[in-house]
């Protein structure tokens, strides 16, 4: 009987859809598990980036300070050369004072530079150490991820096979029933094709009118539940 074949096709379709959903859920779980496994690497990368940023910023500051110190050295040099050529005592003292001020400033810069050198050395060591730890942790993460994804490769093969089966089964089902199935699955989810058990719809558990039950048994057409719109069938 054609209706029986349609119903059988829809039941098979439903089984395929529920397995596809199951695979999809497992993929989500796997994705979350992989994200969790990556957390230590994320934390290390954040730390490494922060240290690198501090290091680069300090390197920039240091270069600027070195520039200022070199500029001061040149100015001190120039002023010192000018000093013997000055004729008045007032101008001589003024320039001498200026040179002393510049020398003090230069000394202050050099102290800062010296302190920076120590910090730079520490930061460089820390950056190298963090980069090494990141590489190690990344290798560890990739290994674990590959292990975890081995199952997903099976999922891919199964999904492809099921999708092909779904296509060929769909082609054998009356287009109206297939459209109804697709519509209900969208609104209510699986199952769409439900058994009648002791006069009740297995989808919504409402008691069906006896006439509806008889119509389903007769199997002249596909009958839907008057309460939930799911496709009904009886086991024969
Ligand atoms: Zn129902």
Image (cartoon, rainbow, N blue to C red):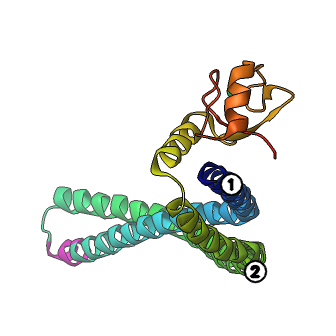
Residue sitting at x 60%, y 29%: 229
Residue neighbourhood size for the residue with mark 2, other residues' Cα within 10 Å, grouped as few (<14), some (14–19), many (≥20): few
> Could you tell me what secondary structure mostly forms the magenta stretch?
helix
> In this figure, which residue is indicated by the disc labeled 1?
8
| Foreground of the two, 51 or 133 | 133
Horizontally, is 42 left or right of 75 in the view?
Answer: right
- Point out residue 32 in the picture as x, y percentages from the top left corner: 70, 56
Side of 95 relative to 48 (left or right): left
How far apart are the alpha carbons under marks 2 and 1? 44 Å
Side of 105 relative to 149 (left or right): left
Whether residue 77 sits left or right of residue 147 in the image: it is: left
Task: Say which of 69 and 227 sits in front.
Answer: 227
Q: Position of residue 197 (x, y in %)?
A: 84, 32
Q: Which residue carries the number 2 mark? A: 143
Segment tinted magenta in the rendering = 79-85
The residue tagged with tag 2: helix, strand or loop? helix
Q: Position of residue 189 (x, y in %)?
A: 63, 39
Residue drawn at the location 14% of the way across and 62% of the way down: 88
Q: Is 82 part of what is drawn in magenta?
A: yes
Does 133 sit above or below residue 99? below
Assess whether residue 107 is covered by the magenta stretch: no
Depth check: 131 or 38 in front? 38
- Nearest the viewer among 202 and 55 is 202
Front disc: 2 or 1: 1
Q: Is residue 118 visible?
A: no
Q: Residues within 10 Å of mark 1 (few under 14, many from 20)?
A: some
Residue 26 against residue 212 in the figure, above or below: below
């Amino acid at each position: 009987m054609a209706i029986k074949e349609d119903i059988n096709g829809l039941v098979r379709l439903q089984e395929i859809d529920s397995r596809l959903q199951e695979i999809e859920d497992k993929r989500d779980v796997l994705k979350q598990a992989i994200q969790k496994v990556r957390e230590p690497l994320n934390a290390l990368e954040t730390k490494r980036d922060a240290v690198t940023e501090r290091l680069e910023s300090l390197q920039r500051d240091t270069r600027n300070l070195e520039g200022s110190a070199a500029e001061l050295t040149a100015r001190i040099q120039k002023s010192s050369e000018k000093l013997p050529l000055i004729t008045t005592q007032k101008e001589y003292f003024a320039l001498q004072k200026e040179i002393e001020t510049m020398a003090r400033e230069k000394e202050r810069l050099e102290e800062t530079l010296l302190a920076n050198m120590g910090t730079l050395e520490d930061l460089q060591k820390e950056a190298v150490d963090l980069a090494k730890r990141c590489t190690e942790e990344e290798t560890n993460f990739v290994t674990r991820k590959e292990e975890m994804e081995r199952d997903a490769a099976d999922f891919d093969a199964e999904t492809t096979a099921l999708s092909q089966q779904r296509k060929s089964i769909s082609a054998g089902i009356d287009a109206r029933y297939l459209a109804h199935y697709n519509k209900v699955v969208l609104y209510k989810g699986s199952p769409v094709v439900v058994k009648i058990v002791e006069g009740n719809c297995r989808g919504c558990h409402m008691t069906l009118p006896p006439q509806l039950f008889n119509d389903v048994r007769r199997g002249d057409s596909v009958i839907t539940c008057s309460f939930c719109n799911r496709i009904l069938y009886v086991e024969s």
